[in-house]
Amino acid sequence: MEEIDLLGFFEYFKKYIFGVIAACIAAALVVIIYYAAFKTQLYTTKTSVILVKNETSTTTDTISQNDIVLNQKLVSTYRQIIKSRLVLEQVINDLKLEYDYDYLNKSVNVEAVEDTEILKIAVTDENPELAVKIADTVAEVFSREVVKIYKINNVSVLDVAELPTYPSNYHLLRDCILALFVVFVGATGIIFVIFYYDDSLNDTNNVEKEIGMPIVARVFKDYSGDDMLVVNKPNAAASECIRNLRTNLQFSSVDSELKTLLVTSTFPSEGKSFISANLAVSFAQSGKKVLLMDCDLRKGRQHKIFKVSSRYGLSNLLVGKVSDYSEYLFKTEIEGLYFIPRGACPPNPSELLNSKKMLSLLKELQKIFDIIILDGAPVIGLSDSVILSSSIDRTVLVACANKTPKTQLINAKKALQAVGANIAGCVINNATAKKGSHSSYYYYYGYGEDGKKTEKSKQ
């Protein structure tokens, strides 16, 4: 049986806590409104009779043991007599009620006190005074009919009905608590089922074990929609995370110099282009000469981030002469950062990226630049990045928190490993900053600089 991560479920549950609280409050309000506007108040009163020889009886003078045994045996029969048409229709006639037999039968309840000869007659009605009259009349008519049927006078009233002052069906506090409990347990159960079957990547303590590779960075979600975050909001949480990613990648390549880095993802819109662009800026800010290449020849969007034309770029260079690469290099406003856009969309991106020209181009560019960052196409469904990764120093997989399916992320990792890719690890994009952490400080500091809360998805 699969082990259940209770701590992970607790973290998952916290995302829905306000929704659960709102549902509980709504349930309580529904109960209150129902009681106030729709619930009919009913009043219940009780009278009790005892089966014992009446002192005025003319048949015998004393109570014998046989009488007691007989009365106890008659208790069940007497309960049926009380609720019979014979008795209840007489009650309706005596009190001139507008009820029929079926309605009154539902309003009258008879129960026997265990191991005694006592019968309790309970009557429930909207009118408390009428409930008292019905209860007393039922006891009276029942006594008369017993004499007629059995020729014995062994029924005596033990307690007369009292006027009820509080509705018997009014349990507002109890029903509110019950509604809160049912909604809370139900919502928790639904959330647990969603959590159990949710395959999306949740940033929990054992996520590295689940996906089978290290987390090299967690990039916290930024609501400004700014693609060049490291430049425009250097104190934002996401900017600090990008710098941490740069440091982690440098430390992971101590034994061999990191010259080429492929940034890819499982599916589109997980943030790989955002990570690639800002990571390139971060390396340039650290004093390196950096080249960013948009190798997503199908839907690459780096040209939009750097505001250049995509008409000419990498695809055109690979089709023509590789030695003419200088014609496709754009020097950005960031000191030390250069950029090659994707170019025109070719019919055969995989063949171009797997060509000898591409290998030759990378070797030539490595002589000029300290590090080359390649923004590759998504792995699932496309072979572009898988082919490219075999000739790159390190590969980073970008995944979106609470969106990327873990199974597909694992499949992407296996596809890269199958061609011998050197996977540095996974970057969790749009992660949630935890309060009290160092990154949380940067998150709220950076968020405060920008007043906007508009969310924009980043590919």
Image (cartoon, rainbow, N blue to C red):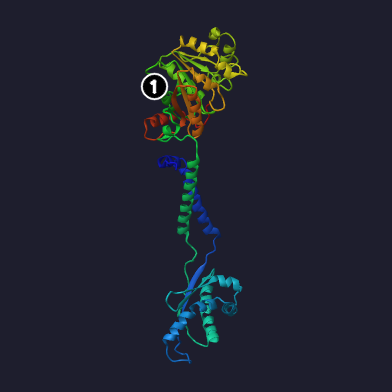
Question: How many callouts does the rendering have?
Answer: 1
Q: SS of the residue at dot 1?
A: loop
Q: Residues within 10 Å of mark 1 (few under 14, many from 20)?
A: some
- Quadrant of the image occupied by residue 298: top right
Residue 291's spot in the image, x, y percent? 48, 14
> Looking at this view, is 126 or 411 the one in front?
411
Residue 317's spot in the image, x, y percent? 57, 12
Image point 48% across, 78% down: which residue? 75
* Residue at the extreme right: 347
* Residue at the extreme top: 323
- Whether 312 is drawn above or below 96: the answer is above
Quarter of the N terminus within the rendering: top left
Image point 55% across, 17% down: which residue? 353
Residue 18's spot in the image, x, y percent? 47, 43
- Residue 138 appears in the picture as rendered: yes
Residue bearing the label numbered 1: 252
Disc 1 marks a residue whose amino acid type is Ser
Residue 278's spot in the image, x, y percent? 47, 21
- Residue 228 appears in the picture as rendered: no
> Looking at this view, is 283 or 3 the one in front?
3
- Whether 57 is drawn above or below 399: the answer is below
Image point 57% across, 72% down: which residue? 104
- Whether 93 is drawn above or below 260: the answer is below
